[in-house]
Amino acid sequence: MTDKTATLSIDRGEGKIDAIDLPVMEGSLGPNVVNVGALTANGYFTYDPGFTSTAACESKITFIDGEKGILLHRGYPIEQLAEHSDYLETCYLLLYGELPNPAEKHEFVSIVGKHTMVHEQIRTFFNGFRRDAHPMAIMCGVVGALSAFYHDSTDISDSHHRTVAAYRLIAKMPTIAAMSYKFSIGQPFMYPDNSLNYAANFLHMMFGVPCEASNISPTIAKAMDRIFLLHADHEQNASTSTVRLAGSSQANPFACIAAGIAALWGPSHGGANEAVVKMLEEIESVDNIDKFIARAKDKDDPFRLMGFGHRVYKNFDPRAKVMKQAADEVLEELGIQDEMLEIAKRLEEIALKDPYFIEKKLYPNVDFYSGIILKALGIPTSMFTVIFAIGRTVGWIAHWNEMISGSYRIGRPRQLYTGYAQRDFVPLDNR
């Protein structure tokens, strides 16, 4: 809080003016914020569709400066975390506010490993779904149902319960995700192998079969770990805000994370990397690229290049540089000759050199490169958002726990009502 105030003057007509003093709050980074809480007592409230100009909470977890291309987790630049850290260490940072020392990291990784298996009865739970069910539909159902299996970690007023729930969700999300995939293709579920690291274990459960030993490439596992890390948190996005709003009603953590998964499922949020692959399929051939680039530049053509530019980042996505490096490493190791990947590489080359893309700041973003990696690994597009959900789980939990651990109120957005004024009921015979 600063000593500054903003004065809102509202002309009520007939020379009457309401002057309302509103305190100005100052964060450690970013713009100052006008606290409009006093408006309601004076008979007003704000109108902000999409909440794009409204801070709904105070947080110490993640900071984004879209104009400068900055993403910080607990103050650490995402580029440094991606280069020097790994996903589980970043999870510890997001949850506890500091990087772990070696003993703390070892203990954290060990505890997560002990929670990777799911209740055996959950295996039979899957039989209630159709084989062609979308994996995100399964994720919503199974994660929400975890509260029916783990009653000993649903008391949100108990800090130990919250900690256990956090470990369980981080550990079990890859297991449930892999089970969703295996179920859809009719293969047997693979139990976790806790001798593997987090990302390699997920790949083992995704692609392994009981009759053969899994052989996980370190390069591929590293790329998957980076995908998880780069999606770990992104401030107050739609799914994180959904988790906070659900949590404000004191719903159990499994229900809150299921709500976040549902919000992430929307193609405008978590489906961006899936949209990249669909775009590549639409272009179909390298020979068609020039035609589609021309369409993208035509403001009257509805076609849009997916995976370029970002709603928040106005210059560049700091995660994209790291993801590009991972994509290059994966493609080099796999040596795949694939038409869609050739299209992607050609589009990247054009976007980084074409004056139109440079002027419009339509740089390849994290979704573009993650889509390429997942496609190269043979992961179906229906699983792309599921993998996003695995990585984002820790961010959801960190925000949920930050809210529950502090002072909060149940979320209750207001509305600008534009419907009928009061009307008198007309009996059916008189209508």
Image (tube, rainbow, N blue to C red):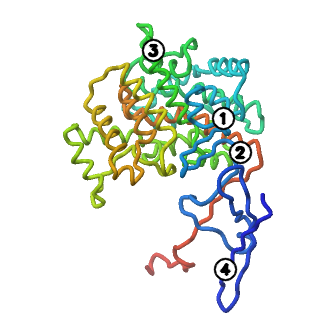
- The first of marks 3 and 1 along the sequence is 1
Residue at the outermost right position:
3
Instruction: Indicate the amino acid at tag 4.
Output: Ile
The residue under label 1 is 94
- The first of marks 4 and 1 along the sequence is 4
* Residue 100 image point, x, y percent: 71, 25
Cα–Cα span, label 2 and label 1: 14 Å
Cα–Cα span, label 2 and label 4: 34 Å
Q: Secondary structure at mark 4?
A: strand
Cα–Cα span, label 3 and label 1: 27 Å
Q: Residue at x 46, y 39 (%)?
A: 366
Image disc number at residue 50: none
The residue under label 2 is 403
Q: Residue at x 47, y 19 (%)?
A: 205
Query: Is 56 located above or below residue 76 in the figure?
Result: below
Instruction: Indicate the amino acid at tag 2.
Output: Met
- The first of marks 2 and 3 along the sequence is 3
The residue under label 3 is 216
Cα–Cα span, label 3 and label 4: 65 Å
Query: Which is more foreground, mark 2 or mark 4?
Result: 4
Q: Residue at x 45, y 19 (%)?
A: 219
Cα–Cα span, label 4 and label 1: 42 Å
Tell me, yes or no, whether the two marked residues, 2 and 3, touch with CB atoms within 8 Å.
no
